[in-house]
Structure formats: structure tokens, C-alpha cells
């Protein structure tokens, strides 16, 4: 089958949608489909958004492929009679951050965006959401029901557990929405010899500088290590494999769940927060991790509990791995759903 995978991206930002779309393309090609990619830059600026939507709508690729798979609502505006939408992000939260909302022009823009989203979803033959949180947004904001289809890990079989070591891993983006600063603050109250390792991907140098300033301000240079460089896949595997557990505190419902999948596939427990809606779809308190209030003392207490009881860390991590097995999150299933 000839398939085009369409997605959007923000220039110079390594987003989850780009990563997952690339993994989807690789999977489809392994299954002998002829696959090509169409990517559109997307700027969340009131002056540019209507033109961006129009530009996508003007593309008619009906004669170019048998199936269009869109990984976002906006990329689903491309014209094709056989479209499937796998919504990796809903864009509703980012629309709310637009610079003129609250004005008359902003009101007209909101109507334009809502009409464009409704058109895109109406034309899709099937609607999937990458999490229950995003499915809820689609239903609440647009009235469209969707099926949850979680993005899997690529090369999941390579993740393993070597030991429950002497550090907690924080593999988040260094942005306010992922709140890595909570992990740094928590380390002030961790009395054990555990270290915290942060492995942010390529991101805004200003955010990295703020985090490094926080580490120095609290005098945590010996307890917190910030790996502000690009890390190879082999290093990522090793870091998960040897960690005692991981911390993950996304406040954004559209953050990728890949960190949790990486953790559970490595049989590591996850410490998350009660207001992290995406994490709560996977992490059950004291079953396969800890769900604690977004408070440094509460996070520190959970870290200390894992440090004192390595058997508990092992049991929670194994329960996370078992949950993944029951959910049957794999690329073969995703490809079958999207092309079926």
C-alpha cells in the first residue's frame, strides 16, 4: 500500500510527535508498505496560524497515495478521501497560549481554529488518540469520540534491567511543563547517598542554564548530575538498565508517555505526581510506582523509600513491566489499527 504520514513540527524543537511519526514510518516500511513523509512547520502565532491552516488545506494528495495517516489534527487538513487521524497532540492547550486570545481578533481566530479542527476530524475515517487524556480533550473540546492507541517504544526488546543501582533517573525535557526542577528540589531532602541524573534532550540553552543555576544554588553538585548533551541510544539503555527508578512529572497532558514505557520495559518503578494525568494512566500508587503530590518533600520521601527497600523497587518495577505486557503496546498492533 502507498501511504503518506503527515505531521507538524515546531522548528528547532525535538517534539514527541516527530519521534513517534518517524518510528511509525520505519514500522510501515518494515511491513513492505511504500511510505513517504510530509511535514509542515507550525508556529503558534495568531498572525500566522490562519495562513498555515490554509496552506495545509490547499494540498490535495488524493492521487499520490492509498492512505493518509495524520499524526495531528492540523496535518489532517490535507485533502484525501481515505484519512486516518492518530492524534498525538490535540493543540488545544497551545491554542490557548496564542498571543491575542481575549480580543475580538482572538475570538475570530478561535472560531477559525475550531472550524478547521472540526473539518479535519469529520473527514477522518478513523480517530485515534495517543492517550486517554487527549481522547478526553477531543471529546470535551470538539465532541468527537476516539479510540486510545498508545505510541509504543521502538526497539523495546533492547530495554533490560541489569541492577537497581545508586541513582534515580530523570529523563525529561528541561521545560516548565515537565518540571524537572521538582526532582532537583526533592534531592535537598534526600539523606541517602542516591544521586539524581537528568538526561534532557537537545532543548533551549536558557532552560538548561536555569536548571544548572538551581543545582548550584542548592549546593547539589555532588548529588545531581545534568547530562546536557546528546545521548546515544546505547547510553539511554544503560542508564535505564542500572537505575534504581525514574521520576516523571509532566503537567502537560500532551507530553509523550515514552518515559514511562522505557521505565517499565526496564523493570523500573516510576515516581510521578497526582496532577500528571498522562502518568496516572500507567502508574498506580504503590503498585508499580508512586503517585505523590507535586511537593519536594513528598517526592523525596518516595525516593528514600526506594533507597531503603531495594526489594520494593524490584517488585514495583516488575509490576510495571507486567502492566505493559497486559496493555499489548507494540508497533505491529499500531500498524494494523492504522492501516486496517
Image: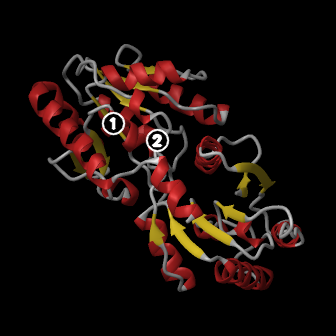
**Which color scheme is applied?**
secondary structure
* Above or below: residue 32 compared with residue 157: below
Q: Which of 153 and 226 is in front in this view?
A: 153
Residue drawn at 73 percent across, 49 percent down: 34
Residue drawn at 58 percent across, 32 percent down: 201
Query: Helix, strand, or loop for circle 2?
Result: loop
Residue 119 rendering spot, x and y as whole percentages: 71, 83
Which label number is shown at residue 153? 2
Residue drawn at 55 percent across, 43 percent down: 175
Report the side of 17 relative to 133 (left or right).
Answer: right
Q: Is residue 184 visible?
A: yes
Residue 124 rendering spot, x and y as whole percentages: 65, 76
Report the side of 264 relative to 217 (left or right).
Answer: left
Tally of marks = 2
Residue 303 rendering spot, x and y as whole percentages: 22, 33
Labels 1 and 2 touching (C-beta < 8 A): yes
Residue drawn at 78 percent across, 73 percent down: 80
Name which of mark 1 and mark 2 comes first in the sequence. 2
Find disc 1 in the rendering and name its residue: 265
Q: Is residue 5 visible?
A: no
Local crowd at mark 2 within 10 Å, few (<14), some, or many (≥20)? some
Residue 241 rendering spot, x and y as whole percentages: 33, 23
* Above or below: residue 330 compared with residue 232: below
Query: Helix, strand, or loop for circle 1?
Result: helix
Q: Nearer the viewer, residue 102 or 75?
A: 75
Report the side of 133 relative to 68 (left or right).
Answer: left
Image quadrant holding the N terminus, namely: bottom right
Amino acid at each position: 500500500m502507498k501511504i503518506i504520514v503527515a505531521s507538524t513540527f515546531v522548528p528547532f524543537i525535538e517534539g514527541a510527535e516527530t519521534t513517534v511519526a518517524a518510528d511509525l514510518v520505519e514500522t510501515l516500511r518494515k511491513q513492505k508498505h511504500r511510505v513517504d513523509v510530509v511535514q509542515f512547520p507550525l508556529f503558534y502565532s495568531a498572525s500566522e496560524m490562519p495562513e498555515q491552516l490554509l496552506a495545509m488545506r490547499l494540498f490535495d494528495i488524493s492521487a499520490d497515495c492509498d492512505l493518509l495517516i495524520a499524526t495531528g489534527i492540523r496535518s489532517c487538513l490535507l485533502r484525501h478521501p481515505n484519512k486516518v487521524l492518530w492524534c498525538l497532540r490535540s493543540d488545544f492547550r497551545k491554542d490557548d497560549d496564542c498571543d491575542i486570545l481575549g480580543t475580538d481578533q482572538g475570538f475570530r481566530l478561535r472560531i477559525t481554529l475550531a472550524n478547521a479542527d472540526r473539518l479535519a476530524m469529520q473527514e477522518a475515517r478513523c480517530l485515534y488518540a495517543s492517550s486517554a487524556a487527549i481522547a478526553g480533550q477531543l471529546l470535551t473540546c470538539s465532541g468527537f469520540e476516539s479510540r486510545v492507541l498508545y505510541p509504543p517504544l521502538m526497539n523495546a526488546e533492547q530495554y533490560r534491567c541489569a541492577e537497581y543501582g545508586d541513582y534515580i533517573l530523570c529523563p525529561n525535557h528541561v521545560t516548565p511543563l515537565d518540571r524537572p526542577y521538582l526532582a532537583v528540589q526533592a534531592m535537598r531532602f534526600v539523606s541517602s547517598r542516591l544521586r539524581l541524573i537528568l538526561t534532557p534532550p537537545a532543548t533551549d540553552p536558557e532552560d538548561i542554564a536555569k536548571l544548572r543555576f538551581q543545582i548550584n544554588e542548592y549546593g547539589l553538585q555532588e548529588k545531581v548530575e545534568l547530562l546536557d548533551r546528546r545521548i546515544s541510544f546505547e547510553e539511554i539503555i544503560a542508564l535505564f538498565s542500572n537505575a534504581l527508578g525514574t521520576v516523571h512529572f509532566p503537567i502537560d497532558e500532551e507530553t509523550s508517555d515514552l518515559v514511562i514505557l522505557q521505565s517499565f520495559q526496564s523493570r523500573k518503578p516510576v515516581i510521578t505526581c497526582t496532577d500528571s494525568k498522562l502518568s496516572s494512566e500507567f502508574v498506580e500508587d504503590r503498585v508499580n510506582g508512586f503517585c505523590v503530590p507535586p511537593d519536594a518533600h513528598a517526592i523525596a520521601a518516595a525516593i528514600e523509600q526506594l533507597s531503603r527497600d531495594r526489594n520494593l523497587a524490584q517488585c514495583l518495577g516488575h509490576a510495571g513491566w507486567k502492566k505493559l505486557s497486559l496493555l499489548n503496546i507494540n508497533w505491529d498492533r499500531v500498524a494494523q489499527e492504522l492501516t486496517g
